[in-house]
Amino acid sequence: MDINKLLQRLEEADDAYTNGKPIMTDLAYDLLKDKVLKFLPPDHPRIAKVGHAPSSAWPKETHSIFMGSQNKVCTVDAIREWVAKTLKALGVKKTRFILQYKLDGFSLGVDYLNGKLSKAITRGDGTIGENITPNAMMFRRLPTYLVVGKGVSVRGEGLISKENYAKIQAATGDHYKNPRNAASGISRRLDGSHSKYVEVVTYDINAKVQNESDKVKVLEQLGFSVVETFVFEDVQEIVDKYIEVKDKLRPTLPYDIDGLVLKVDSVEQQEKLGIKDNRPEGQVALKFDSDQAITVVLSIALQVGRTGKITPVAILEPVDLMGSTVTKATLHNFAYIEENQIGIGSEVVIEKKGDIIPQVVDVATTGEEYKKPTKCPSCGGPLEDDGTNMWCFNPGCRERETNRIAYWIKVLDMKGFSGKFILKMWDEGKVRSVGDLYKLTTDDFVGIDGLGDKKVKAFFEILKSTSEMYLDKFIVALGIPSVSSGTAEDLVKHFKTWDAILSVTPEDMMKIPGYADTSARAVCSGVRDVRDMAEELLKAIRIKEKKVGALTGKTICITGALTTVGRKEAEKMIVDQGGSFKNSVSRDLDYLVTNDPNSGSGKNAEAKKVNDLAIKAGNPPPIKVISEKDFMALVGTTVEAKAEEKKEKEKKDSGVTLVYNNIFEED
């Protein structure tokens, strides 16, 4: 790793930001800076540098009080260590701390003279910032007049709420990557457009008070919006609140936060602790475990998907992220590689959220020039280039076709059919398509290592269980790239049969709400592409008629765990009663099932948001939030009855479940 090269890249990023043409996102900049600072000596001038130099687009202004930055910690153990170190430095066994949300926006210093807002200055490099007063006069929740005649200096964060961010994206054509970028960009727009969406939340003032918590009270009394503040003396209480905000409260907040700020409450004690490298020793930022990290591209591998699309994958210098070591991440497509000049040696930002495959989301430094492949890495056949992606259309491509079979198996939840089994049957010449699965006989398994009579019998029992299904499930399992489960439901709802769906035109699709020209054409084209595959499968599979029941025409989503049934069984119960199961919350949802309506889950928060907006508009809330008990009543049973069924099933299946779960599994 060439630290001098990375340091030079940081300086280039500073210059580009200064000129209003950033070459990387704020996050990529922060990650790259954190990486570089670890390798610099303590007396290096870069250590004490704060923020960016101000842009030439706005007048320069010197802050009345230096706007520094904060040291940060990212783990519970580090929080405890910081508190212990601070108490030791103060020579006390206990003191009072405050904890505040670390707002994810841009820092702003606002000065008032004779009660009137005189200037608003961005942090810049901490000493000199940009005077954006004309725009600040339009910011929300920032008073332009105070009932105080003396000079007042206030510190706060300019941010954009999640609700207003959606409005801005709609107005600008999704111009901004996230609310933080939007707030920073809009605050510095010379024409002042959209400034009304920026709001200011404050946390500091030059009032002569004894405690930091007193400053918050003064700000509130003067009419400012203030950051939520918690007061603690015990380190365990601090840790508990940190975990609660990180794991539960964060997604329910109206704006983004990227951590908490822990401060010694006493102003006198803060002064005693002093400042080092332009960072106060009496304060520390408690960052949440990042779902992003920066690392180096070692090579680029290629994967062939079920549609024949070639996906480039970055092989990475191992990096720890969210409790696991990440060694590879998707690069999306070849246009992304070209646009961002990614190659061997590139410093890239990777992101991992939940079960989503890690992906490259930003680039800090470019690498060696990458040349597109011309041949399929699996079959060696020629590739077609559409300008964004590369495609292999060879119907005999091993990786393409086995992935198509694997997708069918995954959608139908055919437990035990591993990738190893699929490849084994392909290499034996027994299976070349999904339809071939349903043509297999017991003779096809003779002589294949590891497949005894019990496993073969189990194979055919599982296969039989998938020989009939509802049409929307069949369509999803076909693996059409442009057709989600929601799209499949729309197709079945409006066109009823597979034969009718084959004849659907883009004009027909565009009559359904939510489908524009591009999406309608993609659906119709995708359906035509799988015509032959579907025709072969329908020789072995029977399409079941949708049932009419208590939930006909209703849509239901489930969040959290149910006590008596699994998610798959609950979905089947919904469908058997004529309803539709949804994986996400939207305005057209009828029921959200949850055993904890007060939890901080994203689905609970989204349902509340939808209902609150409806009530605000004078309409009844569209989504009914119901318990597992209410849900069971809807489908004609009870929690007690399902619990008893579950108990009996577990007793009956004892000793059999293990066999089914391990059929043809990977070694």
Image: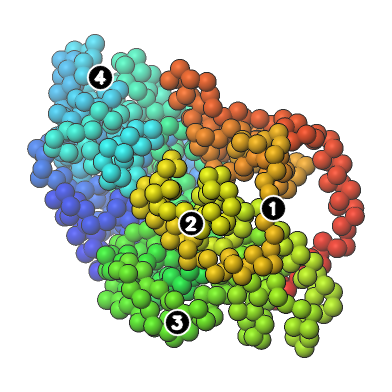
Q: Residues within 10 Å of mark 4 (few under 14, many from 20)?
A: some
Q: Amino acid at mark 2?
A: Ser
Q: Nearer the viewer, residue 221 or 619?
A: 619
Q: Secondary structure at mark 4?
A: loop
Q: Amino acid at mark 3?
A: Pro
Q: Residue furthest top?
A: 147
Q: Amino acid at mark 1?
A: Lys
Q: CA distance from mark 3 to mark 2?
A: 36 Å
First-in-chain label (1 vs 2): 2
Q: CA distance from mark 1 to mark 2?
A: 21 Å
Mark number for residue 544? 1
Q: Where in the figure is residue 140, as x and y percent of width and height? A: 28, 25
Residue under pointer 3: 377
Residue under pointer 2: 503
Q: Can residue 311 be seen in the rendering of this structure? A: yes
Q: Looking at the image, which residue is at 43% across and 48% down?
A: 508
